[in-house]
Amino acid sequence: MIVYTVHHSTVYRYRRSVGLGQHQILFRPRDSFDQRLLDCKLEVRPDPVEIRWIHDVFGNCLTLVDFNTLAEVLEFETTIRLEHTPEKAPDFRIEEYAREHPFAYDGNELPDLAPYIRRHYPDDTAVRRACLVHRRRVRRFEPR
């Protein structure tokens, strides 16, 4: 088992006082088969009116920070401690259908994947050209 401590600091500086409004912070990692959150701390300057935590539809922990003040500087400091046990990691295998590119997703997965598959700029041909070049280079994925 390995214990990691991660400290992150974000500072915003403004030319003049600004209204801060609500901020969303994603700093808490999710627990998983090989990772367990031991501790997390958040420091915010200036003092917020309210700090609350919610889970989004994907299971991420969002921290919502509300202010009712003006400020020229906004600071977030986060510290997390987590336990990592890579030896507990399962053996993820690539399904046979996913070894050929491009591949078709199962119909049950499409509603969740649709926003990521949809072309956001259908008239832009650069992505299509890059995919065709890549497809010629790599026809079959072979794991190490």
Image: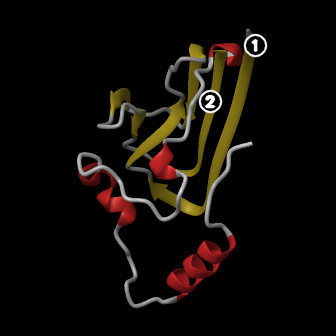
Q: Amino acid at mark 1?
A: Ile
Q: Considering only vertical position in the picture, is 10 above or below 117?
A: above
Residue at 56% over, 34% down: 93
- Residue matched to label 1: 2
Q: Residue 86 sits in which quadrant?
A: top right
Q: Considering only vertical position in the picture, is 106 above or below 79?
A: below
Q: Secondary structure at mark 1?
A: strand
Q: Residue 3 sits in which quadrant?
A: top right
Q: Considering only vertical position in the picture, is 79 above or below 60?
A: above
Taking depth in this image into account, of 32 and 129 the one nearest to the observer is 129
Taking depth in this image into account, of 98 and 114 the one nearest to the observer is 98
Residue at 54% over, 28% down: 29
Residue at 61% over, 41% down: 75
Q: Amino acid at mark 2?
A: Thr
- Marks 1 and 2: which is nearer the front? 1
Quadrant placement of the N terminus: top right
Taking depth in this image into account, of 67 and 33 the one nearest to the observer is 33
Q: Earlier in the sequence, mark 1 or mark 2?
A: 1
Task: Give the image location of residue 28, x and y in percent.
Answer: 52, 28
- Residue matched to label 2: 78
